[in-house]
């Protein structure tokens, strides 16, 4: 079962001020790379990092690094629980200002079980959130 758990990634284009979440599957077979970065695939994104000066500068500025320290993980990395909570906040904002007061549930954004930087999480409908799975059981 562990091989079927999708990791959730965060894609950040600091030049366009765009942040998106995606699963392994979406990275491989979807158009998410093109949507966020304007290139067809991760290999093209590596070239973009290497040769697109304004993109390099935006990454350096956002991360407080020099261009020699730019790596692919500065724009695509496995998301953390904290980052996923930001997605939940954004989804609630899209539902409306009083969504939290009415305790509206949000739709599950990914598979029931996902992998984040902080571990494996399972969706809980009661709280409309992913909860860390106890892996010792």
Image (cartoon, rainbow, N blue to C red):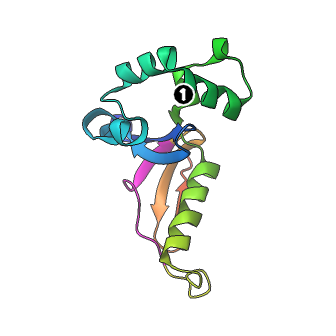
The residue lying furthest to the bottom in this view is 102
For residue 122, side relative to residue 136 (left or right): left
SS of the residue at dot 1?
A: helix
Residue drawn at the location 38% of the way across and 41% of the way down: 6
Q: Is residue 100 above or below residue 60?
A: below
Residue 136, quarter of the rendered image: top right
The residue lying furthest to the left in this view is 29
Q: Which residues are magenta?
A: 105-115
Residue 98: % across, % down: 59, 85
Residue 127, quarter of the rendered image: bottom right
Does residue 4 appear in the picture of this structure? Answer: no
Does the magenta portion include 20?
A: no
Instruction: Identify which residue, 111 or 33, lies in the foreground.
Output: 33
Does the magenta portion include 111?
A: yes
Quarter containing the N terminus: top left
Residue 93: % across, % down: 56, 72
Does residue 126 appear in the picture of this structure? Answer: yes
For residue 11, side relative to residue 100 (left or right): left
Q: Is residue 115 above or below residue 88?
A: above
Q: Which residue is mark 1?
A: 55
Instruction: Identify which residue, 59 or 88, lies in the foreground.
Output: 59
Residue 117, quarter of the rendered image: top right
Instruction: Identify which residue, 43 or 123, lies in the foreground.
Output: 43
Q: Residues within 10 Å of mark 1 (few under 14, many from 20)?
A: some
């Amino acid at each position: 079962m562990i091989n079927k758990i999708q990791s959730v990634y965060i894609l950040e284009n600091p030049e366009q001020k765009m942040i998106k979440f995606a699963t392994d599957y979406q990275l491989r077979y979807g158009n998410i790379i093109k949507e966020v970065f304007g290139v067809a695939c991760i290999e093209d994104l590596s070239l973009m990092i290497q040769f697109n000066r304004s993109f390099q500068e935006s990454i350096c500025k956002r991360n407080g690094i020099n261009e020699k320290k730019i790596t692919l993980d500065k724009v695509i990395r496995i998301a953390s629980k904290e980052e996923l909570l930001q997605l939940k906040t954004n989804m609630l904002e899209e539902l409306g200002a009083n969504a939290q007061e009415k305790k509206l549930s949000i739709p599950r954004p990914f598979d029931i079980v996902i992998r984040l930087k902080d571990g494996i999480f399972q969706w809980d409908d009661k709280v409309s959130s992913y909860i860390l799975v106890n892996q010792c059981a």
